[in-house]
Amino acid sequence: MTLRIDCYMSMACASEESLRENMKRALEAEGVEAEVNFYRVTENEARSLGLRGSPSVLINGEDIQPVDITGFS
């Protein structure tokens, strides 16, 4: 099974560069190969996807940090 990691960020999220670097380091440290995708989404798109924060990271479709908050910034 291929590990799939989807990273969703708001249009104004300033953490993309650090997220990419942290993701790369973590995968290398663990010796894990994964398909990693980065997406910029609007608040409406985030809402329709059920995202609750920016960035939101999903591994094989599961949010790694599900929280009960509203809004996407």
Image (cartoon, rainbow, N blue to C red):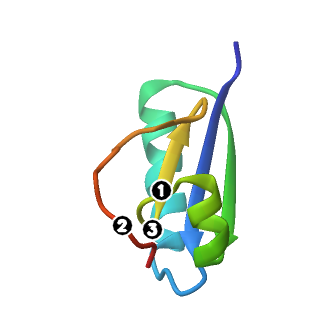
Amino acid type of disc 2?
Thr
Secondary element at tag 1: strand
Where residue 56 is drawn, which disc sits there?
A: 1
Q: State the CA–CA distance, disc 3 to disc 1.
A: 5 Å
Secondary element at tag 3: loop
Q: Nearer the viewer, residue 15 or 63?
A: 63
- Dot 1 alpha-carbon crowd within 10 angstroms: few under 14, some 14 to 19, many 20 or more: some
Q: Which residue is mark 2?
A: 70
Residue plotted at (30% across, 61% down): 69
**Disc 2 to disc 3: CB gap under 8 Å:** no
**Disc 1 to disc 2: CB gap under 8 Å:** no
Of all residues, the one furthest to the left in this rendering is 68
- Dot 2 alpha-carbon crowd within 10 angstroms: few under 14, some 14 to 19, many 20 or more: few
Task: Name the mark nearer the viewer: 1 or 2.
Answer: 2
**Disc 3 to disc 1: CB gap under 8 Å:** yes
Residue plotted at (57% across, 64% down): 47
Of all residues, the one furthest to the top in this rendering is 1
Amino acid type of disc 1?
Ser
Amino acid type of disc 3?
Ser
Residue plotted at (29% across, 50% down): 67
Q: Which residue is mark 3?
A: 54
Q: Along the polypeptide, which appears first: circle 2 or circle 3?
A: 3
Q: Along the polypeptide, which appears first: circle 1 or circle 2?
A: 1
Task: Name the mark nearer the viewer: 2 or 3.
Answer: 2
Where residue 5 is drawn, which disc sits there?
A: none
Q: Nearer the viewer, residue 11 or 32?
A: 11
Q: State the CA–CA distance, disc 2 to disc 3.
A: 11 Å
- In the picture, which quadrant includes the C terminus? bottom left
Q: Position of residue 20 (x, y in %)?
A: 54, 60
Q: Tell me if residue 56 comes above or below residue 1 in the rendering.
A: below
The image quarter in which residue 38 lies:
bottom right
